Image (spheres, rainbow, N blue to C red):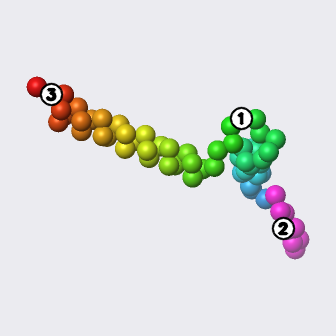
Amino acid sequence: MRRRKPSGSGGGGASGGAAGSMLQFYTDDAPGLKISPNVVLVMSIGFIAFVAVLHVMGKLYFVK
């Protein structure tokens, strides 16, 4: 009986290409603005809080 050789690139060929393209966003060669994920998270939460405050102010002060 023949033994199968364990192949390193088994069934994950597509995921290797996707991981390679994802890593391009974090290299120095990628074009665009370099912002860390933490900054994006803080800015998005700040924007959500700002919109919520505007809604509250609209309900409390500007409705007659």
Which marked residue is nearer to the observer: mark 1 or mark 3? Answer: 3
Q: Secondary structure at mark 1?
A: loop
Task: Give me the C-alpha separation between circle 3 and circle 2.
Answer: 70 Å
Look at the image and give the residue range highlighted in magenta: 1-9
Which residue type carries mark 3?
Val
Q: Which corner quadrant of the image does residue 6 belong to?
A: bottom right
Q: Which residue is mark 2?
A: 6
Quadrant in the picture for the N terminus = bottom right
Mark 2: give few (<14), some (14-19) or many (20+) Cα within 10 Å: few
Sequence-wise first label, 1 or 3 = 1
Horizontal and vertical percent position of residue 32: 71, 35
Q: Nearer the viewer, residue 46 or 10?
A: 46
Horizontal and vertical percent position of residue 37: 60, 50
Contact between marks 1 and 2 (CB within 8 A): the answer is: no
Task: Give me the C-alpha separation between circle 1 and circle 3.
Answer: 43 Å
Which residue type carries mark 2?
Pro
Horizontal and vertical percent position of residue 8: 83, 62
Which marked residue is nearer to the observer: mark 3 or mark 2? Answer: 3
- Looking at the image, residue 42 lies above or below residue 8: above
Q: Which residue is mark 3?
A: 63
Q: Left or right: 32 with respect to 41?
A: right
